[in-house]
Amino acid sequence: MVPRCTGLEKREDEARKRVEDARSKVTGLGAQTAENPAASLLGPWAATFQLAMLLGLPVWLELAAPVVLAYGFAPLPSREEAPKRKAKRRKKKRHPRPPPAQPSAKVLPLKKAVP
């Protein structure tokens, strides 16, 4: 933190006292005062806070404008749809096969020739 000059602090206190005296004289004459409720909480930062609130929206719009212009307000692109599969073919019913043909004659195996 930057050290402050005691003379500067003394002048600030005197100025605050003068403002309070002038305000009390004016209110004594019947004037109504309206104080910023944030000033009591923020102290010397009240003016900075008020300036930040006034400039907050325009600054935010300036910062957000490139994003809005780049992407726009359009919804995000949807996923590509997977190619549709062809419908499965139904299996054709096959008729039962006829049983294998029975040999009409008895077949004998060949004999080996004996030398």
Image (cartoon, helix red, strand yellow):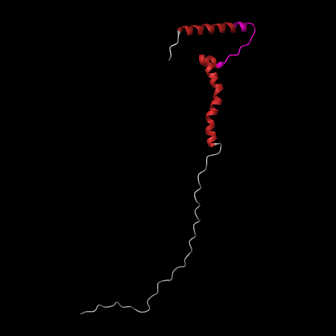
Residue 106 picture location, percent across and down: 40, 92
Q: Which residues are magenta?
A: 24-37
Relative horizontal placement of residue 101, taking residue 73 as reference (left or right): left
Q: Residue at 60% of width from left, 16% of height from top?
A: 44
Query: Is 28 covered by the magenta stretch?
Result: yes
Farthest left residue?
A: 115
**Count of numbered tags:** 0
36 over 9 or under it: above or below: below
Which quarter of the rendering shows the C terminus? Answer: bottom left
87 over 8 or under it: above or below: below
Residue 13 picture location, percent across and down: 59, 8
Q: Residue at 70% of width from left, 16% of height from top?
A: 34
58 over 38 or under it: above or below: below
Q: Between residues 48 and 101, which one lies in front from this camera angle? A: 48
Query: Is 25 covered by the magenta stretch?
Result: yes
Residue 66 picture location, percent across and down: 62, 38
9 over 62 or under it: above or below: above
Q: Between residues 80 and 41, which one lies in front from this camera angle? A: 80
- Place residue 74 in its image quadrant: top right
Q: Residue at 69% of width from left, 7% of height from top?
A: 22
Residue 95 picture location, percent across and down: 55, 79
